[in-house]
Amino acid sequence: MTTDSPETTWSTAEEEIMEATYRALLEHGYADLSLSRIANELDKSKAAIYYHYDTKDDLLAAFLEFAVDRFEETVDTETGDEPSEDLEHVTEKLLPLQPDAEQRQLQAVLVGLRSQAVTNEVFREQFTQIDERLAATIRGIIERGIDEGAFRDVDPSRVAEHILATVNGAMYGRTTTDRKSAAAAARVSLASYIDSELRRRS
Amino acid sequence: MTTDSPETTWSTAEEEIMEATYRALLEHGYADLSLSRIANELDKSKAAIYYHYDTKDDLLAAFLEFAVDRFEETVDTETGDEPSEDLEHVTEKLLPLQPDAEQRQLQAVLVGLRSQAVTNEVFREQFTQIDERLAATIRGIIERGIDEGAFRDVDPSRVAEHILATVNGAMYGRTTTDRKSAAAAARVSLASYIDSELRRRS
DNA sequence: TGATACTAACCGAACGTTCAGTAAGCAATA
DNA sequence: TATTGCTTACTGAACGTTCGGTTAGTATCA
């Protein structure tokens, strides 16, 4: 179920800049992200960054790709036997019941970037594609489930959007509030919905 | 089902500043929000703002309250007869099938503010409270539905978190992507879930 | 006349960006 | 094998602009 995307390659220098940007974003957030702060994290001069990128906007565009790649790596999912298991697998990837520090950090960075999509077209296009790909993956699993007779004859597109919205919303809540158990509760309820509403009654 | 919150009052001058901040945020986004830009929208000098607010942070804290008040006004919901109708009513308020310009703008501003909750504690507390109140409202409707025998005996808290996450996620997607019909699809699927999974089978 | 609600002018710091210069390394030539 | 020429990857200083914030002064009105 892997939807392939171009995958840019990075020189070591560029990768170090991306990594430094990542750390600066984590510490200060997008609104307070400056080249000085990135340079600090990088342990090189501001001008060193300009040797590799023409403008701050260029750097940010590159970083957006970097972060999106990193996100889609973690989601990339093998296909199993049971469609309902595939669905659980993909929701666990997107919204782990117990996310580790790395997953939480990546989500925090992505939420910061994504909010820029409200005013910035380049960002909005990227996140449109991300959601499009995720929805397609989920839709594919549901379609397979219906074909195989494991799922009832629901509208795959609608249910896929429902699942994606729930997963996105729970993740959003998890990174922007202190409501610790809310995301997990949403996921559990979603799982029981999938099980009882989608799975064909025996 | 109105959960009351303090409701600050604003002088006309303060309200004009809040309104100007609102417009500046809409145009430039949180990351590029400056006092000069607010003053521009206000048609007064920067120092005029400092007459009413000590620091930019003070102004932002006040604006956060202003925006949250405005949001909760639009959500405030009368209670009807049927719990399932109440649930539809509250989801329509939170995620209108055809949002008007004002609703879209307010959501855009809130998404911008909310992303700051990742790094800023004051913001995170506010959005924690918002979600807490919304979850409580939804949970209350479900509990009433179970009591009255209209709903099956589900875990009200879990289902409430599910609904809230879906609604939040769909709204988030709506304001940060170009996937025009996705939010509506999620809401329709959610409604059919509520109808068939929650409502007691006849 | 004193409080209220401002404006104009300004401050130092930080911003994104540019520039001149340079150390290290490599490839070709003498 | 030493010299020359050129590239890569930087540094540090400086540019003009904008930032959040201040200060001194002023018009309005009770």
Image (cartoon, coloured by chain):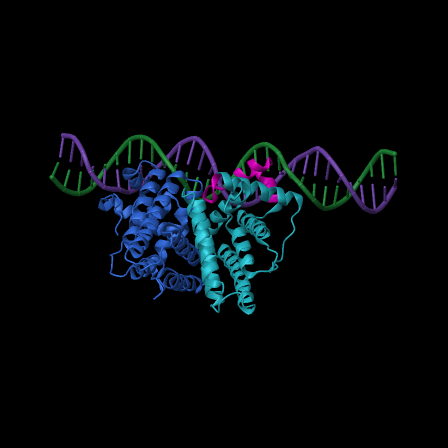
Chain colours: A cyan, B blue, C purple, D green
Q: In this view, does A139 lie above or below A77?
A: below
Residue bounds of the magenta highlight: A28-51
Residue at image coords 31%, 57%:
B90
Is A48 magenta? The answer is: yes
Q: Is the magenta stretch mostly helix, strand or loop?
A: helix
Residue at image coords 46%, 51%:
A188
Query: In the rendering, at what x and y percent does residue A199 appear?
Result: 49, 63
In the displayed structure image, the side of residue A193 where residue B58 appears, left or right? left
Residue C10 sits in quarter: top left
Q: Is residue A175 visible?
A: yes
In the displayed structure image, the side of residue B74 where residue C29 appears, left or right? right
Query: In the rendering, at what x and y percent does residue C20 appear?
Result: 63, 38
Q: Can residue B177 be seen in this view?
A: no
Residue in the foreground of this view, choosing between B179 and B199: B199
In the displayed structure image, the side of residue D27 where residue D12 appears, left or right? right
Query: In the rendering, at what x and y percent does residue B3 appear?
Result: 27, 48
**Quadrant where the image shows the C terminus of chain B:** bottom left
Residue in the foreground of this view, choosing between B188 and B184: B188
Is A169 magenta? The answer is: no
